Amino acid sequence: MIAENVKEILQELKGGNAFGEKITLVAATKTRSAEEINEAIAAGITDIGENRVQEFTQKYDFVHGARRHFIGHLQTNKVKYLIGKTDLIQSLDRFELADELQKRAEQAGWTADCLLEVNIGCELSKSGFAFEDAAAAYRAIGQRYRSIRLRGLMAMLPLEGEEAELAALVKKMRGLFDALRAEDGACKYLSMGMSGDWRLCAANGSNMIRLGTCLFGARR
């Protein structure tokens, strides 16, 4: 079933997003076993994302052949466990975290590729920079932290809302992404879209999506 789901979605993604860009599919592997993850990789998954540091470290040696993303809220005291092991940290959501990432990465002689997380829905339950502050934060991190390389933006849509309102939020993020990409050649990814809303996000400019249930079935 996992292999079929992966192949079906990869086939659907072949056309790219509304801008004709390739869409990177990140398999969200929270609660999934190494066997399930390896099955998804064998079926064509190239990127996997964990939400929790403990799960990331527990599975690290048992999963092979994919780029590693960290996609959950990252506590500063857990940063040390990800240094040198992630290809992309998608949840850089505050300067305090940037400070710790810079310190640890510099000590290790490593560069942390990250996405700046934006709280596009202004939701109290979610982390991230306010939309109004995101461009300034992006520029400040790029200038101030030598061991952090920003590669784009990440956001989550509210779970509820009219389709037109949600589409407008994606377009707003896309506008910010385009503005920052014009300034910074390393800015490559707009990561928006999960199992419930990825088609809407892709239709309005996202070029990276994070899918769990769509690939693996209902979470245990």
Image (cartoon, rainbow, N blue to C red):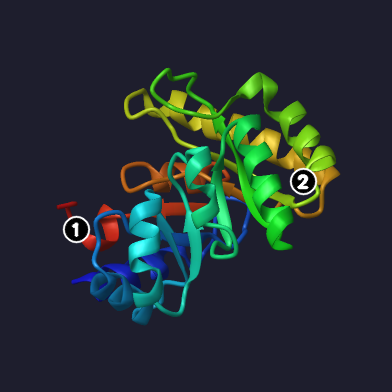
Residue 32: x %, y % from top left: 25, 61
- Direction from residue 46 to residue 40 in the image, left or right: left
Does residue 92 lie above or below 158 as drawn? below
Q: Which residue is mark 1?
A: 217
Q: Amino acid at mark 1?
A: Gly
- Direction from residue 183 to residue 136 in the image, left or right: left
The kind of secondary structure element at disc 2 is helix
The kind of secondary structure element at disc 1 is loop
Q: Is residue 99 visible?
A: yes
Residue drawn at (77%, 46%), measured in percent from left and top? 181
**Frontmost residue, 152 versus 50:** 50
- In the rendering, which numbered label is found on residue 181? 2
Residue drawn at (27%, 56%), measured in percent from left and top? 214
Q: Earlier in the sequence, mark 1 or mark 2?
A: 2
- Direction from residue 163 to residue 110 in the image, left or right: right
**Frontmost residue, 107 versus 29:** 107
Distance between mark 1 and mark 2 Cα atoms? 35 Å
